[in-house]
Every structure is written in C-alpha cells, then in structure tokens.
C-alpha cells in the first residue's frame, strides 16, 4: 500500500496539490463525454473520457484531477463513494485502486502490479459495511476500507458486478450468477456454485448489473427492465426496453435509460423522472431529498430536483463541462500559426478507424473541429483517421489534412474547400478502385506554398499540388508502391527528406529538385535502404520514424537504434549519418531505443520522444542528457510518446501520448529575438511571498546576461537558453537579495552590453 499525502478533503472546500515538482506540467486530457458520477457532501465527482473532475456544490467550481495533483494513475473505469467511511473509491482500467478520504489518497497497486494476472480490468464497486467488493476480470477483490488494504481476492473468473444478501455473496458473470457463503473459504473456487434461475423472460447473459435492495437480489437486464428474485421466483419490477443501467445508493434503487430514470424505495412503486434528457449515462444520490446528479455525456454534469407530485424536475445546474480536447486521440502534433494542432487518427499497416479528430489549442482554450459539420458537407460521408496536416503560413485557418483512407481535405476552419480523392486528383488507392484506401502519409507546404504529399501503396509515392492548382506526380521507381511512406521534411535549403517506418521498405529518400518542381530532369535524388557513418560503417538503423532539421542545418533522425545525425544534408547522393557518443563516452545516446519524434527548442536543444523510455531533453549536440521524464517522475501517462511540438514564443513543450491525450511542460528555451526591443521580466515587481524564479524573455539567442544592483555590483550572471533566462532572486551565496531595483544587462558575443530591463524586488 502506497500513501500519497494529498491535502484534499472531500467534505471541505480546500483542495490543494502537494506535487509542487509537477508545477511546470499541464494535463490536457479530454473531459468531453461524462459517463460516471458520485456525490459526496460538498462535491459531485464525475468521470469523462476516463478522467476525473469535480463540481463544488458550495462555490460552483470545476476542478480536474490527474497524476499531476494526486491521482496514482490514468484511465478510470469506475468510481463509488462510501458515505460512512467518507471514501471515494477509484478503480482504473489497469487494475490500480485509489482510496480518497479525509487524510489523503491511498494507492492499492496490488492488482495492477500482479504478474500472475493477465486481464486486470475493474468493472464495478460494491460496498458492504466497511468493505469494498471490487468486481474485476480476475474475480472479486475485497478491500478493507478501515485498514486501507486488500484482504482477499476470489479468483472465480470475470465478474461484472457483485452484492451481498444475508450471508451470501453473489457474483454476476457473463453466463449467469455465482454464489458463495461468506463463512466458507471463498478463496477456494470449489466453494462457489451457480445460482439456479428459471425464467423465460430473459437470457441470463443479458443481465448487466446485480444489486441488493430491500433484501432482494435485483437484476438489471439490458433492453428489458429490472427484475428481482422472490423466493427463487423471478419477478419483473420495471419494464423499459431502453434500460442501460442500475444503481442502489442510500436507500434508493435507480434505474436509467438515456432519456430518463426511475427511482424506487420499496420495490413496489417507482417514480419516473423524464423530460429533456437524451444522453443520460449514470445517476447518483447521497442525502438531499429528491435531488439527483446525472452524468449526461457531452452535456456534462446535471443536477435535478424532482417536483413534488410530478414526474418532471427542476434543474439545479446544467451543462457543467470542462473546456478540453474532444478526445484523447493524439497521433500528431504541430505548432504553427500561433496555436497547437492535434490530429487524432492512426495507422500501422491498417488504419485505426478513428473518428475524424482535429483539435487546436491557443490562449488556454481548446477548439474542436465539428466532424458532424464536415460530414454534412461531404454528403454524410464520414471520413476517419486524420494523420497530420499542413498549415498555410499566410492564413492559419487554412489547412490541408492528410487522411489514411479518404485522401486530403482542404479546410477553412471546419468548412470544406476541397476534398481531393480519386475523382478530382491523381491520388491513388491501395485497393483497386476503393475510395476508402487512399492512404496519405503526410502533407507539407514548401516555402512557395506548394503542397507536397506522400501517397502510400501507389505508383507515384510523392505528389505535389502547386499554388496554381497543377498536379505533379513525382516519378522514382525506388520508392514506388511503398506500403507505408511517412512524412516529408523540407529543409531551409529546400531539400526534401522522406522517412520510411516499415520493414517492407526501410530507410529514407532524399531529393534536391533544384527549385524546379515541374522539371525533374535536373533532380538529384537517392534512396537509402541503409545508411553509413563518416567512417563508412553501415548502421543498423533502417526504420526511420521521424526526421527534423536543427538550427545548425543538421538532420536529426529517430530510428530503431536511437537518434542519428546527418551533418552533410546537401550531399544528397552521399549522406552520412552518425551516432552520438555521450560526453562521458559510456555509450551512444539512447542506444537501442526506438525514437518516435524529435523537436528542436529555441536554444537548439533536442526533445526526444521514445517508444517505452519516456521523453529526453538533450543539449544541442546530444552529448548530455538534461532531463528524462517518465511515468515514475512526471505526470506522463505513458512512456511511449509519439509526437512533440514546441511553442517558440513561450517555450512550452507539448507531448502526444496517444490514447491518453496531450500534456505540456514549461520549458526554459524560447526562440531568440532579432534585437532587445521587446524584453519582459515577470513577475515584476517581485513580492516577498514569491519564492519561484523570475523569467526574463525576449532576449537574442545566446545572450550573456548580467544582473546587478543599482550601484553596479554583480549579483547574477548566466547565458540565455534561446531567448530566455530565469533568476531565483538570490545572489552568488544563495541568499535572497535585498529590497531594491536590479538592472538586467544583456549582450550577444558580437554586440555591446546594455541595460535591457529592470526588476523591482521586495524582500
């Protein structure tokens, strides 16, 4: 049992994080589709897209929760609140369990960490006295909420839900209901037996939930209704063919459909609450008479109070939603036009069949493109798997989106300008004449505005749409009919590099078109199934997952053996790639680690995303590892990160953890400016209670920065990381400086030193 000391009281209004080391991180998880709710005295907790948030009933606040502020894991499957123990029990998809009470969050990772259990999914939670009976794919896990420990695990196979009546524990499986006496050794599966239920009203496999209510075993039957056992006879209590769930809380049985819910206190009568609901997914009730809290899908949390003598209700609150990404799909990231772009498709040899997902983030707000609106413009044709996009530098609302199946959409915001497919372009399909197999690897715009396209499984793997609407099919037999052709990197010098990610066609392709894209006779190109280093040694790198150009014009490639660098990118026919030796000469940088993405920050440092080892920040030449963020020392939800993008103005680094969403880290490196005309220091003035670093931004790259007092005495000296430095308001001895005005002087190695700004410090 691990205890995370987290000063959050479920029954008070003070919610604080102790994870100060996570302050630089921001979690951008989806909170779009609310599916679960649990009411506590002062909060209504909800789960949307497997992420937790809460509504404060007293202050009307909305607060999100993640690993950054106390939770132990990601992807929540179920939550329930035990009123007597004041404990919120959180079950995760991977078997992890959190107990959240007045004294903190206690983590029970037994099931998650078990090496003998394959499927660790948690399905439901049931309370009896001071115990939580957690239904899981392995069976039933019994948790003592007083001791905050797991006491038993009954391995009887997958259990959907459980309950106790008298001295009998009932477990719902996919084929029926099993039972065991609590005073027997239920660790021994032979002490369990099948409950005989004779009925022609429904199939036992259609039971989706069981519960004890009024000392009766109640059964929620999908698309049927609620039934209960009375002297071994099945009695129907409620009939509704839309029924989707049932819950018993605090003396009330609640059964619900997407359009309303039923409430009973006696298994004789029930109240019906309907009207205006069309996406109800869960209901919770704690103690306030006739007041219920609902999980309403994309409408978020809803609070209702039933009107006396009526089936209708008064709305207490409605539409409580969090601005967030629409989904946790995050295949590719791009920062262009002052905003982050996220495309949420996916592919390997086959497509992922993911809903058309395009999302942007700027100024703290997410905007999600409306796939329904786009589909209507395409005559209800629902395209899927948006892999990446190219942003028009002259109009950031104008994009070209690559789809792994349906070709290319040219959009103005979410308005379709053109749909390039088999009927109006030379794009090719991978399967006969099937228009759902136009597999586009990427779209990229060159400096002249021409659109470069990679087309998988086609005779002409590279195609170009010129600014005047002309299509060019690039001819090269070496890369024809490539199963997966990925992205095109266009360098500052105009060279093109294409990476290949599958063993059926490994390596990379390099092209110098000499600025004449309509005339291929002067092109210089080379396909490399393998690459060599400067000494002529052939590298084991053959799968190229990414390529990027750094500020020195070198090409960094992420491969199956780690990052490698090309220092002669202009020599198209004789490219050499070299592995990077660490400064201590102990090994190559990330030796043997698959690298999915590399991004260059304002100081030419490299952020490297790996498949299984987290994220690395290395210095400009890669000889020194500055940071390595993993799930163990950061809020990263996975050690496999597939894309990185950097805001050049702020230095914020965004990571795509596909299936988990987007995270960002506040890096220190920003793009350097051309002069010192726009220097800012914040906060300024620095108050006595401020104990963090002052940020000085807007500097020229590689500036030498000095901070002095008003008399000219040197207090601090450093070199800018790109266009930014930080200062902790302390002198060389580590003491906080005295109250006063401090001068910031900056100069590049080629320029004269001058005062660029002032900082007022109050001790």
Image: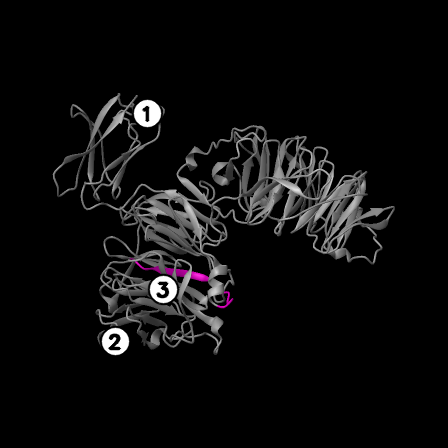
Quarter holding residue 285: top right
Q: Is residue 407 at all visible to an observer of this figure?
A: yes
**Distance between the alpha carbons at the discs numbered 2 and 1:** 64 Å
Q: How many marks?
A: 3
Of 598 and 470, the residue lying toward us: 470
* Residue 732: image location, x then y, percent: 25, 27
- The color scheme shown is one colour
126 relative to 362 in the view: left or right: right
* Residue 527: image location, x then y, percent: 32, 70
Residue 355's tag is none
Query: Residue shown at 48%/60% (left/top)?
Result: 373
Reply yes or no: does residue 139 show up in magenta: no
Q: Earlier in the sequence, mark 3 or mark 1?
A: 3
Of circles 2 and 1, which is in front? 1
* Residue 388: image location, x then y, percent: 40, 60
**Magenta: predominant secondary structure element?**
loop
Query: Going by the picture, which residue comes out furthest to the right?
Result: 231
**Distance between the alpha carbons at the discs numbered 3 and 2:** 20 Å
Quarter holding residue 303: top right
Residue 687's tag is 1
Residue 443's tag is 3
Q: Earlier in the sequence, mark 3 or mark 2?
A: 3
Mark 2, other Cα within 10 Å: few <14 / some 14–19 / many ≥20: few
Q: Is residue 1 at all visible to an observer of this figure?
A: no
Residue 520's tag is 2
**Contact between labelled residues 1 and 2, with CB atoms less than 8 Å apart:** no
Q: Which residues are magenta?
A: 379-393
383 relative to 339 in the view: left or right: right
Query: Residue shown at 28%/30% (left/top)?
Result: 684
**Distance between the alpha carbons at the discs numbered 3 and 1:** 49 Å
279 relative to 628 in the view: left or right: right
Query: Residue shown at 51%/35% (left/top)?
Result: 61
């Amino acid at each position: 049992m691990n205890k995370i000391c987290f000063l959050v009281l479920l029954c008070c209004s003070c919610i604080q994080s102790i994870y100060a080391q996570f302050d630089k991180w921001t979690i951008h998880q989806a909170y779009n589709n609310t599916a679960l709710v649990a009411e506590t005295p002062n909060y209504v907790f909800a789960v949307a897209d497997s992420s937790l948030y809460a509504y404060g009933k007293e202050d009307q606040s909305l607060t999100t929760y993640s690993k950054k502020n106390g939770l132990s894991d990601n992807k929540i499957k179920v939550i329930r609140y035990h009123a007597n123990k004041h404990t919120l029990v959180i079950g995760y998809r991977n078997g992890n369990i959190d107990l959240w009470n007045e004294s903190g969050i206690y983590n029970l990772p037994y099931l998650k960490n078990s090496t003998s259990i394959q499927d660790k999914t948690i399905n439901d939670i049931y309370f009896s006295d001071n115990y939580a009976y957690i239904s899981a794919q392995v069976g039933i896990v019994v948790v003592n909420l007083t001791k905050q420990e797991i006491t038993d695990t009954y391995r009887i196979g997958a259990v959907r839900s459980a309950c106790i009546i008298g001295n009998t524990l009932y477990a719902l499986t996919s084929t029926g209901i099993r039972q065991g006496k609590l005073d027997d050794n239920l660790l021994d599966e032979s002490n369990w037996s099948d409950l005989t239920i004779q009925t022609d009203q429904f199939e036992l496999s259609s039971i989706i939930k069981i519960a004890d209510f009024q000392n009766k075993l109640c059964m929620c039957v999908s698309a049927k209704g609620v039934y209960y056992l009375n002297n071994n006879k099945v009695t129907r209590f409620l009939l509704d063919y839309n029924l989707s769930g049932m819950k018993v809380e605090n003396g009330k049985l609640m059964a619900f459909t997407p359009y309303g819910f039923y409430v009973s206190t006696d298994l004789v009568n029930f109240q019906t609450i309907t009207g205006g609901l069309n996406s109800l997914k869960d209901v919770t009730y704690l103690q306030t008479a006739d007041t219920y809290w609902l999980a309403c899908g994309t409408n978020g949390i809803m609070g209702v109070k039933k009107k006396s003598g009526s089936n209708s209700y008064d709305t207490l609150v409605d539409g409580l939603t969090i601005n967030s990404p629409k989904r946790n799909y995050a295949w590719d990231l791009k920062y262009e036009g002052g905003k982050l772009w996220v495309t949420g498709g996916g592919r390997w040899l086959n497509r992922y069949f993911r809903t058309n997902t395009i999302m942007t983030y700027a100024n703290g707000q997410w905007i999600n493109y409306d796939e329904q609106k786009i589909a209507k413009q395409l005559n209800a044709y629902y395209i899927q798997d948006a892999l990446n996009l190219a942003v028009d530098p002259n109009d950031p609302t104008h994009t070209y989106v690559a789809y792994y199946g349906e070709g290319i959409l040219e959009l103005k915001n979410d308005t379709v300008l053109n749909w390039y497919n088999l009927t109006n372009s030379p794009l090719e399909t991978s399967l006969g004449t099937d228009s759902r197999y136009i597999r586009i690897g990427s779209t990229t715009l060159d400096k002249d505005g021409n659109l470069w396209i990679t087309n998988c499984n086609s005779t002409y793997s590279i195609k170009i749409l010129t600014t005047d609407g002309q299509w060019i099919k690039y001819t090269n037999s070496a890369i024809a009919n490539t199963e997966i052709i990925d992205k095109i990197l266009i360098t500052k010098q105009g060279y093109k590099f294409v990476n290949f990610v599958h063993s059926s066609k490994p390596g990379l392709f390099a092209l110098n078109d000499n600025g004449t894209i309509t005339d291929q006779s002067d092109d210089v190109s080379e396909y490399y199934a393998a690459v060599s280093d400067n000494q002529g040694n052939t590298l084991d790198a053959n799968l190229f997952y990414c390529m990027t150009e750094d500020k020195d014009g070198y090409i960094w490639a992420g491969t199956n053996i780690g990052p490698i660098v090309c220092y002669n990118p202009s020599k198209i026919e004789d490219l050499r790639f070299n592995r990077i030796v660490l400064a201590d000469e102990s090994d190559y940088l990330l030796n043997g680690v698959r690298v999915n993405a590399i991004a260059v920050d304002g100081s030419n440092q490299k952020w490297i995303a790996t498949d299984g080892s987290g994220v690395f920040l290395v210095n400009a030449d890669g000889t020194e590892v500055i940071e390595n963020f993993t799930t163990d020392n950061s809020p990263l939800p996975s050690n496999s990160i597939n894309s990185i993008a950097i805001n050049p103005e702020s230095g914020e680094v965004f990571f795509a953890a596909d299936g988990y969403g987007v995270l960002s880290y506040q890096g220190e490196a920003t793009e350097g400016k051309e002069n010192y005309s726009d220097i800012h220091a914040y906060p300024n003035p620095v108050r006595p209670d401020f104990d963090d670093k002052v940020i000085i931004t807007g500097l020229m790259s590689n500036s030498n920065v000095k901070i002095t007092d008003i008399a000219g005495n040197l207090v601090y000296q450093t070199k800018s990381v790109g266009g930014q430095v930080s200062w902790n308001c302390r002198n060389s001895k580590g003491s906080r400086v005295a109250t006063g005005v401090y001068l910031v002087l900056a100069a590049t190695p080629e320029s004269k030193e001058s005062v660029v700004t002032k900082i007022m410090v109050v001790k």
